[in-house]
């Protein structure tokens, strides 16, 4: 048996059920519970968030600029949306952006960790942090520009190379 072999669970209708739910089911249920808690909350701080959570069936995760947020649905879909209706929601398709948002959110909510994608084969280790996800700034560890993932999409490598070439040119 090879170590790289993947094991898949097969569900046979009428067959025995696993004793515990899968990671996907637990994550989905946790997100649903958190949305429900938020929607039924009486906190004045969360009035706007409650409306978005109810209308979009979404768990708000990260505020991007005051009115625009990222949130996750129970099915794992990551959306950006405006806090107030109409929410102008938009599915986040960029794999790196999805991973960075979910990674940041998983720091406060470890239950979201299964949604953080692994580095795709075309990605490269971040040249700034060497793949650790953190850099030292004034003697303190802080998240790197890679969002703490330790990897960047290939286009970042090209932008970094171009930036380095431009910085090394003397001014005319």
Image (spheres, rainbow, N blue to C red):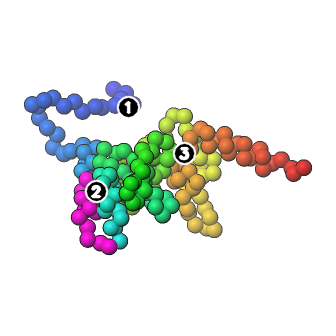
Query: Quick check: can you spot residue 30?
Result: no
Closer to the observer: label 2 or label 3? 2
The image's mark for residue 109 is none
Q: Of the residues under marks 2 and 3, which one precedes in the sequence?
A: 2
Measured as percent of width and height from the top left, residue 139 is found at 61, 67
* C-alpha separation, residue under disc 1 versus residue under disc 3: 25 Å
Q: Of the residues under marks 2 and 1, which one precedes in the sequence?
A: 1
Q: Secondary structure at mark 3?
A: strand
At 33% from the left edge and 26% from the top edge, which residue is drawn? 1
Q: Residue furthest front?
A: 86
The image's mark for residue 151 is 3
Q: Secondary structure at mark 2?
A: helix
Measured as percent of width and height from the top left, residue 155 is found at 61, 39
Measured as percent of width and height from the top left, residue 147 is found at 53, 53
The image's mark for residue 54 is 2
The range drawn in magenta is: 32-44
Query: Quick check: can you spot residue 19?
Result: yes
Q: Contact, CB < 8 Å: mark 2 with mark 1?
A: no
Query: Is disc 3 surrounded by few (<14), some (14 to 19) or many (20+) residues within 10 Å?
Result: many
Q: Of the residues under marks 1 and 3, which one precedes in the sequence?
A: 1
At 24% from the left edge and 33% from the top edge, which residue is drawn? 9
Residue toward you, 42 or 100? 42
At 49% from the left edge and 47% from the top edge, which residue is drawn? 97
Magenta-drawn stretch contains 128: no
Horizontal side of residue 25 vs 96, given as left or right:
left
At 26% from the left edge and 67% from the top edge, which residue is drawn? 41
Residue at which label 1 appears: 3
């Amino acid at each position: 048996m090879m170590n790289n072999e993947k094991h898949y669970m097969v569900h046979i209708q009428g067959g025995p059920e696993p004793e515990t739910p899968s990671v996907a089911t637990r994550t989905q249920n946790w997100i649903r519970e958190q949305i429900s808690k938020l929607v039924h909350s009486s906190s004045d701080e969360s009035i706007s968030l409650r409306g978005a959570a109810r209308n979009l069936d979404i768990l708000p995760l990260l505020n991007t600029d005051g009115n625009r947020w990222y949130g996750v649905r129970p099915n794992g879909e990551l959306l950006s949306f405006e806090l107030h209706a109409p929410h102008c929601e938009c599915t986040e398709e960029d794999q790196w952006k999805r991973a960075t948002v979910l990674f940041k959110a998983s720091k406060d909510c470890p239950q979201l960790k299964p949604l953080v994608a692994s580095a795709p084969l075309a990605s490269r280790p971040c040249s700034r942090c060497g793949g650790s996800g953190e850099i030292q700034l004034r003697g303190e560890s802080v998240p790197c520009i890679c969002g703490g993932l330790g990897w960047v999409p290939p286009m970042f490598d090209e932008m970094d190379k171009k930036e380095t070439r431009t910085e090394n040119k003397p001014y005319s």
